[in-house]
Image (cartoon, coloured by chain):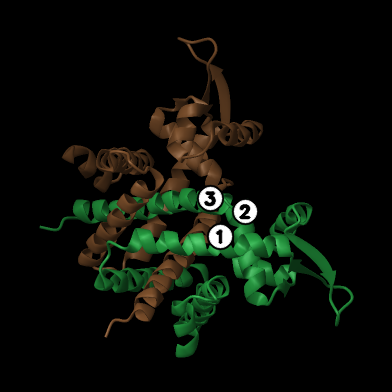
Chain colours: A brown, B green
Amino acid sequence: MTTNFEDGNLVLRLWYASHRTRALLKMCEDQIYGEYNLTMEQYAVLAAIKHIGGTARPTDIARWLGRSTNAVSMIVDRMVKAGLVRRVGDRSDRRVVNVSITSKAENALKPAIRAGWEFIQKITSPLSNEDKHTFVRLHDTLRYEIFKYLNPGANVEEMARNDDESHANLMERLIQYALPSTPEAKRQDGEK
Amino acid sequence: MTTNFEDGNLVLRLWYASHRTRALLKMCEDQIYGEYNLTMEQYAVLAAIKHIGGTARPTDIARWLGRSTNAVSMIVDRMVKAGLVRRVGDRSDRRVVNVSITSKAENALKPAIRAGWEFIQKITSPLSNEDKHTFVRLHDTLRYEIFKYLNPGANVEEMARNDDESHANLMERLIQYALPSTPEAKRQDGEK
């Protein structure tokens, strides 16, 4: 039954499904965060700073986002002008300039995180719990392969595990930060 | 067994898996296309023009990419300077300026498509055929929900079907364009 043609065609469908879903998700997220006058990029920078602790070095933000420090500095420049972040000196090292979130950004970030969270709950609602577990498992497999691709010869197992733990933790903290007063968030806090 | 906490946590894991995979795929694609001196954006514009027929109106490119015509015009400006596209007058309508691909861009696009195709085959190789089918099905469900979200009240069924057909077709054509002389591509052509 299974010919090479069919195999290739199935990978093509998978590639397309992944690409198109990514493009559509980006459109949704641009729209959702745009309502709070944040671009996806700005949202990601604020989320990273928030996760690092409210104040962060540009190099640490860059590491979190998988971008160059130069690229992050350019985004930060525009965000300073927009009043979303400010540059502050480091207490322990005079050469370092940290980036901290303004109250204007806090006021936009919280409802933006909530809106993003509502959106993802809405679009995943037709999936059964089993489907959701499968979705996570398939993506874990892909991410492991991507890690091997990006880091040939490295100890990919440990790298993937650390990446998973730190990033899953980021998402969880963001939700808890944005939804501090809901019963669900309290339960999540209590479960730790 | 299943509490609200666990449900919320599962959606959070799914959201994270989706986000993180997207970020990692973007890193890979930037790296892959970068080897042919193309950014992801330029690659997408060239692929859209190629699919439309080698010459395309900026509004059509914008529609394909889900971007504004303004955004596409700015990207095209830079691509003209980089020698990847040129602006040509429309034969039937003097007011319209079309965008066409240069031979320099053709020479970069073909190996870039091949490299992208090799990459996706590599990272999906640990998935069984059943896994791949499941991956496509889960993404189809998500995309249908995203369509409902982006187009409240519209005839989403037809919209999603048309979107699927036209975009799946784009990917297939691109592969055939880039791999015209392989046995697999010939088989795919023959199957039509």
Residue at 19% x, 53% y is: B6
Chain letter for the residue marked with disc 1 in the picture: B
N-terminal of the two: label 1 or label 2? 2
Left or right, A135 with reference to B56: left
**Which amino acid type is marked by label 2?**
Leu
Inter-mark Cα distance, 3 to 1: 11 Å
Inter-mark Cα distance, 1 to 2: 8 Å
**Which amino acid type is marked by label 3?**
Asp
Question: Above or below — where is A16 with respect to A109?
Answer: below
Q: Quadrant of the C terminus of chain A?
A: top left
Proximity of marks 1 and 2: CB atoms separated by less than 8 Å: yes
Residue B38: mark = 2
Q: Position of residue B11 (x, y in %)?
A: 29, 56
Residue at 44% x, 78% y is: B184
Residue B30: mark = 3
Residue at 38% x, 73% y is: B140
**Which residue is labeled 1 in the image?**
B112
Query: Within the image, what quadrant is residue B33 found in?
Result: bottom right
Q: Quick one: SS at disc 1?
A: helix
N-terminal of the two: label 2 or label 3? 3
Question: Above or below — where is A48 with respect to B81?
Answer: above
Left or right, A71 with reference to A136: right
Name the residue furthest left.
B1
